[in-house]
Every structure is written in C-alpha cells, then in structure tokens.
Image (cartoon, rainbow, N blue to C red):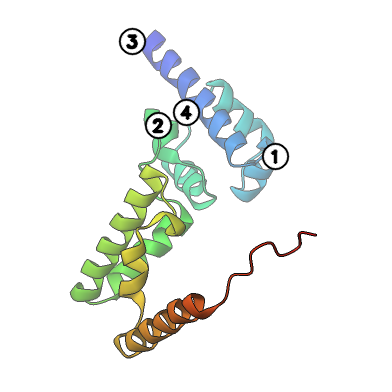
C-alpha cells in the first residue's frame, strides 16, 4: 500500500510541476501566492508531501488545472475566458441562448472545414443585403452591364 501512495505522490508531483510550468509560474511564485514556503512547494512537486485541499483550491485560483494535477485529464476545468462565456450565456434569455448556440455551431463548423467568409457561396452575400437595397443593387448591376455593351472596343489600340 505504501508503494502505491508513494507512486501516486510522485505522479501527482510531476503533474503539478508540469502544470505550474505550463501556466508560467515558478516554484517561488506559486509559494508566494499561496502563502507556503518554497521548500513546501518543492516537497509537493517531488512527491515527498501530499498537498492539502486548501492548497489545491489555491492552485485553481491562480489558474492551474487541478483536475489535471489530480487525474491527468485536461480540460475539465474551464479557463477564465470560458467561465466568462458561460456567465454571459447564463445571463441571457432562452431564445437568445438558442441563437448563440446556432452561431457558435456554425462558426465551429467553418473552423473545422477551414472555410472563411470569402469562401462562402455567392448567394450568401446576396441574402445579407437588406431588402430595400436589393433593388438598388440590381439596378446598378443592370446599368453596369448596359454600359459595358455600349463601350466601343477599339481594335489595335496601342499598335503602330
């Protein structure tokens, strides 16, 4: 049993050091922010001492993924930006929530396929024009086509 605990603490310490580095913290900066000694931080990272719940809570407060540290699985704890997105989502009415989900789903699909706005079919642009402007756009296009038919073509221009 003691070897399992020892192995777990070693793995936990390795993950802690890896996650600390990924977040850009030093051992000293973590120790200072969590009011522990640098030596205690080192002991946690080498697996000599098991961290307590208060320490783990503090890690989460400074941006370290404690779920990863404990389980080895990333992404279970939302980032600050993801938490803000969730809070904004929860603050709006259900109809707007549905629209936000559709918008994000569409953007996600575009990102997956590598499409950009300029890659969308031409019909998409026409639908984006306000209805009152559509007649004006059609009239300009018709005038432009008529003008190109009236423009004389000078053959041999620039030849001597």
**47 up-or-down from 79: above or below:** above
Q: Residue 86, position in %: x, y?
A: 34, 62
Query: In the image, which disc is placed on residue 1?
Result: 3
**42 up-or-down from 57: above or below:** above
Label 1 environment density (alpha carbons within 10 Å; few <14, some 14–19, many ≥20): some
Q: Are marks 4 and 2 in contact (CB under 8 Å)?
A: no
Q: Reading the chain from its start, which is encountered first: label 3 or label 1?
A: 3
Query: Which quadrant of the figure has residue 83?
Result: bottom left
Q: State the separation of the CA atoms marked 2 and 1.
A: 21 Å
Q: Residue at x 37, y 43 (%)?
A: 112
Q: Reading the chain from its start, which is encountered first: label 2 or label 3?
A: 3
Q: Are marks 4 and 1 in contact (CB under 8 Å)?
A: no
Label 4 environment density (alpha carbons within 10 Å; few <14, some 14–19, many ≥20): some
Q: Which residue is mark 4?
A: 50
**8 up-or-down from 34: above or below:** above
Query: Which quadrant of the figure has residue 128?
Result: bottom left
Quadrant where the C terminus lies?
Answer: bottom right
SS for callout 3: loop
Q: Residue 123, position in %: x, y?
A: 31, 65
SS for callout 2: helix
Q: Residue at x 37, y 31 (%)?
A: 73
Q: Which residue is mark 2?
A: 70
SS for callout 1: helix
Q: Which residue is mark 1?
A: 28
SS for callout 4: loop
Does residue 98 appear in this view? yes
Q: State the separation of the CA atoms marked 2 and 3.
A: 19 Å
Q: Is residue 92 left or right of residue 4?
A: left
Q: Residue at x 45, y 37 (%)?
A: 52
Q: Residue 156, position in %: x, y?
A: 68, 61
Q: Nearer the viewer, mark 2 or mark 3?
A: 2
Q: Residue most toward the right?
A: 160
């Amino acid at each position: 049993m003691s070897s399992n605990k020892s192995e777990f603490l070693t793995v936990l310490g390795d993950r802690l050091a890896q996650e600390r580095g990924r977040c850009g913290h030093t051992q000293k900066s973590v120790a200072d922010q969590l009011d522990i000694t640098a030596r205690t931080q080192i002991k946690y990272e080498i697996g000599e001492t098991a961290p307590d719940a208060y320490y783990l809570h503090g890690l989460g407060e400074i941006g370290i993924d404690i779920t990863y540290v404990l389980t080895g699985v990333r992404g279970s704890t939302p980032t600050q930006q993801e938490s803000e997105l969730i809070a904004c989502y929860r603050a709006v009415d259900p109809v707007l929530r549905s629209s936000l989900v559709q918008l994000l789903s569409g953007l996600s699909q575009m990102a997956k396929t590598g499409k950009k706005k300029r890659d969308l079919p031409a019909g998409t642009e026409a639908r984006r024009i306000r209805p009152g402007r559509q007649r004006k756009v059609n009239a300009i296009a018709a005038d432009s086509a008529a003008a190109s038919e009236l423009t004389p073509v000078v053959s041999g221009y620039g030849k001597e």
